[in-house]
Image (cartoon, helix red, strand yellow):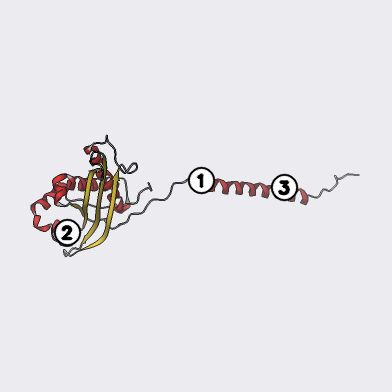
Amino acid sequence: MTRHPPHRPVGRPLLLLSLCLLTCAGCLLLAGCSVFGIAAQALPEGDVPARYKDLRGHSVAVMVWTPRGLQIDYPALRLDVASQVQDKLQRAQKAGKGELKGVAFPHIPASVVRFQEDHPELEGQPIDQVAPRLRVERLIYVEIDSFQTRAQNAIELFRGSVTGSLKVVDVDPGGTARVVYDEPGITVQYPSKGADEGYPDLGDDRTYRGTVHLFTNLLARRFFAHERT
């Protein structure tokens, strides 16, 4: 007589195996969530968006105005600020910033300054009346109200500071212009951190260059997304 092995139920082992697999999967899921949570916390903050996003595809010029006293004390200030703003926008454009795609800069900053010098009668006119004469579609217009390289209360110490405003003028094909962006009260100090009373060893030249760099960096970043600093 043929003997058959005793019948063993398979449901219980399979059930135990399934429970084990589910338990392991749950552990992995929880671990994965924990890992993802840590990774998310470690990721840098998102980009700071551009404050003005409508330069894309347009022709753009940069103009800087300074009071007469600043033109005497810092004769290169208009050109230095305009040049650095335009240069930083062009660098961001080459880096692939989408807000600057297709932007053209038909004028070098020196030619804009020369235009200002050749037409002093325009200085008292509203910028929306001046902008069409530059034959661009967008004018970035910077007004500098104050600029200094010495500390406020100790002129033998060096502490750069600048206060100004930023406007964007939209010029339509018919030559009608209007201010579409206006940000007053932009202030920068150099060094950006440290003692307000100033430093004895910076020197005027270094303080001037550092202040202009920080100011123009802040202005240029109004037009493209950038990392939070």
Q: Quadrant of residue 3?
A: top right
User: Around disc 2, counting alpha carbons within 10 Å, would you say few (fewer than 14), some (14 to 19), or many (20 or more)?
Assistant: many
Q: CA distance from mark 3 to mark 2?
A: 78 Å
Mark identifier at residue 55: none
Which kind of residue does numbered mark 2 sit on? Ala
Is residue 129 placed above or below 83 in the rendered structure?
A: below
Q: Quadrant of residue 212 in the image? A: top left
The answer to whether the residue labelled 3 contacts the one labelled 2, judged by CB atoms less than 8 Å apart, is no
**Residue indicated by mark 2:** 131
For the residue pair 153 and 9, the one nearer the viewer reads as 153
Whether residue 214 is visible, yes or no, is yes
The image position of residue 162, as x and y in percent, is: 25, 48
Q: Amino acid at mark 1?
A: Ala
Q: Residue at x 27, y 55 (%)?
A: 185
Q: Earlier in the sequence, mark 3 or mark 2?
A: 3
The secondary structure type at the circle numbered 3 is: helix
Q: CA distance from mark 2 to mark 1?
A: 49 Å
First-in-chain label (2 vs 1): 1
Residue 17 - label: 3
